[in-house]
Image (cartoon, rainbow, N blue to C red):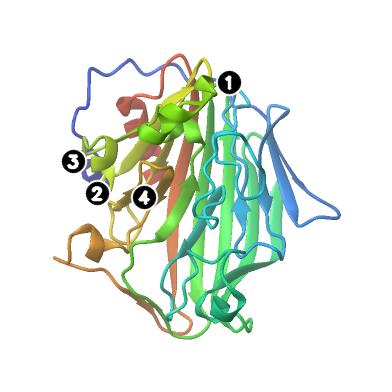
């Protein structure tokens, strides 16, 4: 009961809430590891949903691309592919990822192919060394092990992540549970760039002056943010809330992506690093910049200690986006996991 009260206390009515629809039956999820690539493909109801990519050419493992139930790709194509109208800034923003800007002085967040070779020693890698489990069914499961290392491959943290995938005719859900165990003393120093990130498709960006120059009017930015605490648009950035939703039009469809925090996470409810240009991230360890220096949140793990982060990602498409009431319900069910 206390958990439920804690969640609901952050919810401010945003609008007249649509009735919660009857749940649809979950579709079958297939999780298939490639025999010759560092890749695991996830399909739902026989349709591609996403792939877990962990080749040596990437500085971190990612889910890429993400698709709505309709098949619409809701993540940016760059840097792995090229799609007209997609921005090419921030090459380290790729699909869905999890890392942090400052761990023992190394920048894991901003590492990419664009970093000059003589600067690479300042950055960190997340190197996936084994897939621990794949399971198909009503809920698909993917569990992997990875090491957070410096350029010389010295291990700072061991990561074990479990993904749970599910979906129905209009919705896709990803539950991510990540445990980081310190292989040596590890200091996460309060920093802006972290931790769970998604780079959105252009249509889900908040419109700006540059968008009006696009020739393809079907790909205009129409995005907006709203949080469980009632913040909207660019005001979502640096605010705290149990969940944050980005929504917009993609073709004839209404599409939304929501990230839900978990009450067991450090510094709950999280700060939102949600930018109008398409970066959508939850960062509980960026308190100093988000509060203009009024407070900060550092995390220190001694060798052998661990910390777990839990997040739920919900993707919806249809004639209307998911309501606040439905997200509150999903937050409540996720809090019990």
Between label 1 and label 2, give the one nearer the viewer: 2
| Distance in Å between CA atoms under marks 3 and 1 | 31 Å
Left or right placement of residue 242 versus residue 43 in this view: left
Left or right placement of residue 168 versus residue 228 in this view: right
Q: Which residue is mark 4?
A: 262
User: Where's residue 188, x and y in %?
Assistant: 38, 74
| Distance in Å between CA atoms under marks 4 and 3 | 14 Å
Q: Which residue is mark 1?
A: 169
Instruction: Classify mark 3: helix, strand or loop.
Output: loop
**Callout 3 touching callout 1 (CB < 8 Å):** no
- Residue positioned 53% across, 58% down in the render: 92
**Callout 4 touching callout 3 (CB < 8 Å):** no
What quarter of the picture does the N terminus occupy?
A: top left
Left or right placement of residue 77 versus residue 269 in this view: right
Q: Which residue is mark 2?
A: 240
- Residue positioned 58% across, 64% down in the render: 114
Q: Which residue is mark 3?
A: 9
Instruction: Classify mark 1: helix, strand or loop.
Output: loop
At label 2, counting other C-alpha atoms closer than 10 Å, the crowd grade (few under 14, some 14-19, many 20 or more) is many
Q: Which comes sooner in the sequence, label 2 or label 3? A: 3
User: Where's residue 136, x and y in %?
Assistant: 71, 41
- Residue positioned 47% across, 35% down in the render: 314
Residue most toward the left? 294
Between label 4 and label 2, give the one nearer the viewer: 2
Q: Which comes sooner in the sequence, label 4 or label 3? A: 3
Is residue 201 placed above or below 95 in the rendered structure? above
| Distance in Å between CA atoms under marks 1 and 4 | 25 Å
């Amino acid at each position: 009961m206390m958990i439920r009260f804690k969640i609901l206390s952050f919810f401010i009515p945003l609008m007249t809430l649509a009735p919660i629809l009857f749940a649809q039956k979950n579709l079958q999820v297939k999780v298939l590891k490639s025999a010759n690539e560092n890749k695991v493909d996830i399909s739902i109801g026989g349709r591609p949903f996403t792939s877990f990519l962990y080749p040596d050419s990437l500085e971190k493992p990612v889910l890429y691309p993400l698709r709505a139930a309709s098949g619409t790709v809701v993540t940016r194509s760059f840097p792995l592919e090229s799609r007209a109208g997609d921005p090419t800034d921030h090459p380290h923003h790729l699909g869905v990822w999890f890392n942090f800007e400052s761990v023992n002085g190394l920048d894991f967040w901003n590492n990419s192919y664009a970093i000059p070779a003589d600067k690479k020693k300042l950055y960190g890698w997340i190197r996936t060394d084994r897939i621990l489990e794949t399971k198909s069914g009503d809920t698909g499961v993917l569990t992997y092990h990875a090491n957070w290392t410096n350029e010389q491959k010295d291990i700072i943290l061991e990561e074990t992540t479990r993904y749970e995938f599910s979906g129905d005719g209009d919705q896709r859900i990803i539950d991510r549970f990540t445990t980081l165990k310190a292989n040596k003393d590890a200091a996460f120093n309060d920093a802006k760039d972290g931790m769970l990130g998604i780079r959105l498709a252009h249509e889900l960006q908040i419109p700006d002056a540059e968008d009006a120059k696009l020739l393809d009017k079907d790909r205009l930015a129409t995005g907006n943010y709203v949080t469980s605490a009632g913040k909207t648009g660019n005001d979502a950035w640096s605010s705290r809330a149990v969940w944050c939703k980005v929504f917009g039009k993609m073709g004839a469809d209404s599409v939304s992506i929501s990230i839900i925090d978990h009450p067991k996470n450090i510094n709950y409810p999280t700060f939102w690093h949600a930018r109008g240009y398409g970066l959508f991230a939850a960062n509980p360890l960026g308190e100093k910049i988000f509060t203009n220096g009024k407070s900060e949140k550092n995390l220190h793990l001694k060798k052998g200690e661990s910390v777990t982060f839990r997040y739920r990602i919900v993707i919806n498409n249809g004639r209307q986006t998911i309501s606040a009431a439905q997200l509150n319900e999903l937050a409540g069910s996720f809090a019990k996991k």
